[in-house]
Amino acid sequence: MAVRPHWLFGDQLGPHFIDHRHHGPDPRAPLIMIESWAVLRRRRFHRAKAHLLLSAMRHRAAELGDRVRYVRARTYREGLAEAAGREPVTVCRPTSRAALGLVESLAQVHVLPARGFLTPGDAFARWAEERAPGRMRMEDFYRWVRREHELLMDGDQPAGGRWNLDRENREPPPRGARTLGAPDPWRPEEDEIDDEVRHDLDRWEREGRVSFVGRDGPRCFPATRREALASLRHFIAHRLPWFGPYEDAMLAADPVLSHSLLSAPLNLGLLHPAECVDRAERAWRAGDAPLNSVEGFIRQIAGWREYIWHVYWWFGPDYRGHNALGHTQPLPRWFLDLDADAVTARCLRHALKQVRDTGWTHHIPRLMVLGSRALQDGWDPAAVTDWFHRCFVDGYDWVMLPNVVGMSQYADGGLMTTKPYTSGGAYIDRMSDLCGPCAYRPRDRTGERACPYTTGYWSFLHRHRGPLSGNHRMARAVRGLDRLADLPEVLATAQARGAAPP
């Protein structure tokens, strides 16, 4: 019987996607990779994201050599027809519903189990089915994963005696510090493949095939397995010890702080989550990193990332249409175009500029600056999800749909999180150095210097007072509306700003 070729998608680039063990492809299987420019045409992606994806795919093809048939085509269907004709092929389960629908519609394609995650879907299903509807919580899942994988455990107890070290990991930045002083993150050196990709993107734009947002270059993230491992080693050795306490902080001159920057290579499949968390745990057991930093890092990968992957599939195809708060405002042009220079609010300008220039920010600017702006202004959650998908180098459908609909925009009404994540300017002021030189004052609710996040926060609570008053985590904040003697002026201030850049 002839060996069936195996198809690799562009986010299946690590060695674990061609490992024959555990229902993987035949070790003798020839490989197929398809570069479809129609994928880039469907959405206005960030230019740096397009460059990273194509660079990673072409680098992987170069490594695989004669074993791979690399096809450049308009669509995946056309590329597969060119590469395999009607010959049967295998593929690991894709990471999006759209891609899964495509491969399942092709009679010649046999879909293998998903790879690149710690827990299989059937194991998550058994865990989820034991919970009552609406009672699934990431914290419970995270503890289950830790036990199942004996991860950061001492016998049957969590290392250090506590599962969650968040209290140690929510520190504001050191007073007066411009940077954390941590070693610089690992950065790649571009090569001729990067140059070729950039040349092709330029040509496609000139020909009108595609259109991008944001800026491209130099490449900031790994595009090969070797680069990804170097980035992981550098983080564990030099930056992990600094990570924990300040993972929620923001500094204007230090936008990366001590974050790992590993989300992009993880989501391209260049790293496996197991090797990331295992190396972090070894660093703690060797005395090279404190427990709170290691637990915070492991929580991001074995907890949140793993949970997001599973709930993407668990909540079903209708989850995309959830809009519990009834938000329908379109995204303003300045936001769609990443026009940071049009924005006055320093925190928002800083976050939008970082997205424009690199296609990345860490989780607090995403949630509490960019996402909070969208939530307070009532932007359509589907459009917000699409924006995050397009504009972040680590953004994929499975990543952004639950993160934005469920957490950032509270559009699922509490299936994923117990409250909306938004705040006034006081939170941003406490967790950053961004408010001091800003034209707005974080505690001003009215007047010319009223902070858009402060007026937006109270306006959001007022608009959704009814449903939020029944939320035990929001009831106290909602009651605070009754103590605002200037509430009519606050609402008028928020309304007068409208869709103009804040």
Image: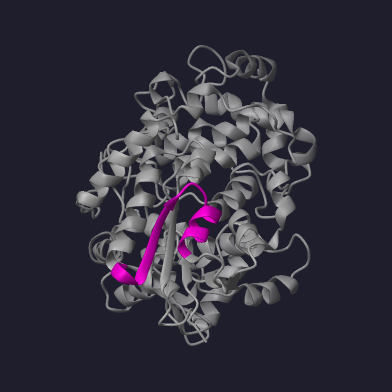
Where 219 sits versus 81, above or below? above
Query: For residue 102: magenta?
Result: no
Q: Is residue 229 left or right of residue 427?
A: left
In the rendering, at what x and y percent does residue 21 appear? 47, 85
Q: Is residue 329 left or right of residue 257?
A: right
Query: For residue 67: magenta?
Result: yes
In the rendering, at what x and y percent does residue 492 appear? 65, 14
Q: Start and end of the magenta stretch?
A: 64-83
Quarter-wise, where is residue 466 in the image? top right
| Magenta span dominant secondary structure | helix
Q: Is residue 11 left or right of residue 90?
A: left
In the rendering, at what x and y percent does residue 78 appear? 52, 53
Residue at 32% x, 46% y is: 256
Quarter-wise, where is residue 56 in the image? bottom left
Q: Nearer the viewer, residue 116 or 446?
A: 116
In the rendering, at what x and y percent does residue 92 appear? 53, 70
